[in-house]
């Protein structure tokens, strides 16, 4: 079987297109990585040969011999569905964790996203928390970015605000959201800061830039980001309707949501009395 025809390529095509259609990936904005192992790939005969190798620029030995299907640098989410073997690459991390080996894709000379270090570092962080989580997605959701200009960059404040915008929020991200300071994209530094937050959160806000989300499947990760962005959109709409909040979801109602859906709200953001 050809890797091109795999469910993995198909699903990334679908998710990149959906993300673009939501307006979260202008031009080459956004990137996705999906971690795969030998077992997931055993049916594909065209991923054995190493087409190219490159230095990762940091120690990824915790991910040695794992594979990542990832979007390419400079590539447009809008186009991935039209030319997946150009815009996507399957990279294997070398046994010493220092190099990436291209096994499939990037057929016109492409390279992994500039945020590859942030992705790999986030995968390392989430593997330690839950080994089933194998997706990292970054994109530029409009209302989340807008919120980073009007609100204090405080995790408690953001988490409570987003929880109170819709009943869905607390159920989908009971741990709340992490926030890093504004940093230059594409650097190891932003990767390290993001991964540190990923020890406690599945969503990390990059102020004035976008969002990083993680999950066990592409659908789940997309849905997580979609839920955060929907909450931010509701906040924007409240502003558009004059900004006056006449009634809200109370802390007590948040607690009851947690009980009803069997999730534990982050006690730093919602005290459990
Ligand atoms: O892939 O979104 O942060 C382009 C970006 C960089
Ligand atoms: Zn970005």
Image (cartoon, rainbow, N blue to C red):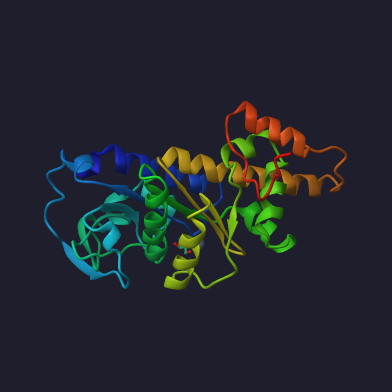
Left or right: 127, with 55 as reference point:
right
Quadrant location of residue 65?
bottom left
- Name the residue rendered at 25%, 39% in the picture: 6
- Name the residue rendered at 36%, 60% in the picture: 120
Left or right: 48, with 63 as reference point:
left
The answer to which of 220 and 97 lies nearer the viewer is 97
- The x, y position of residue 235, in whole percent, is 74, 47
Q: Can you say which quadrant of the picture contains the N terminus?
A: top left
The answer to which of 100 and 97 lies nearer the viewer is 97
- The x, y position of residue 215, in whole percent, is 44, 44
Left or right: 178, with 61 as reference point:
right
- Name the residue rendered at 37%, 44% in the picture: 13
Q: Is residue 132 above or below residue 59?
A: above
The answer to which of 237 and 202 lies nearer the viewer is 202
- The x, y position of residue 147, in whole percent, is 69, 57
Q: Can you say which quadrant of the picture contains the C terminus?
A: top right
The answer to which of 99 and 109 lies nearer the viewer is 99
Label total for image: 0
Is any atom of residue 74 visible in this view? Answer: no
């Amino acid at each position: 079987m050809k890797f091109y025809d795999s469910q993995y390529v198909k699903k990334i095509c679908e998710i990149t297109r959906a993300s673009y259609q939501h307006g979260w990936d202008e031009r080459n904005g956004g990137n996705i990585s999906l971690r795969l192992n030998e077992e997931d790939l055993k049916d594909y005969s065209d991923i054995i040969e190493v087409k190219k190798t490159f230095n990762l620029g940091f120690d990824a030995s915790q991910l040695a011999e794992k594979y990542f299907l990832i979007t390419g640098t400079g590539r447009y989410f809008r186009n991935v569905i039209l030319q997946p073997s150009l815009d996507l690459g399957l990279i294997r991390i070398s046994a010493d964790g220092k190099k990436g080996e291209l096994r499939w894709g990037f057929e016109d000379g492409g390279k992994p996203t500039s945020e590859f270090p942030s992705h790999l570092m986030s995968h390392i962080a989430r593997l330690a928390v839950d080994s089933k989580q194998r997706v990292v997605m970054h994109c530029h959701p409009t209302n989340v970015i807008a919120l980073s200009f009007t609100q204090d960059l405080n995790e408690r404040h953001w988490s409570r605000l987003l929880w109170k915008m819709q009943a869905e929020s607390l159920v989908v991200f009971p741990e709340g959201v992490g926030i890093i300071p504004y940093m230059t994209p594409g650097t190891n530094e932003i990767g390290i800061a993001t991964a540190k937050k990923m020890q406690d959160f599945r969503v990390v806000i990059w102020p004035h830039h976008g969002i990083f989300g993680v999950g066990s499947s592409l659908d789940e990760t997309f849905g997580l980001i979609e839920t955060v962005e929907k909450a931010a959109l509701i906040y924007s709409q409240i502003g558009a309707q004059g900004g006056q909040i006449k009634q809200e979801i109370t802390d007590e109602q948040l607690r009851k949501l947690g009980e009803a859906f069997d999730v534990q709200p982050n006690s730093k953001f919602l005290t459990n009395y």
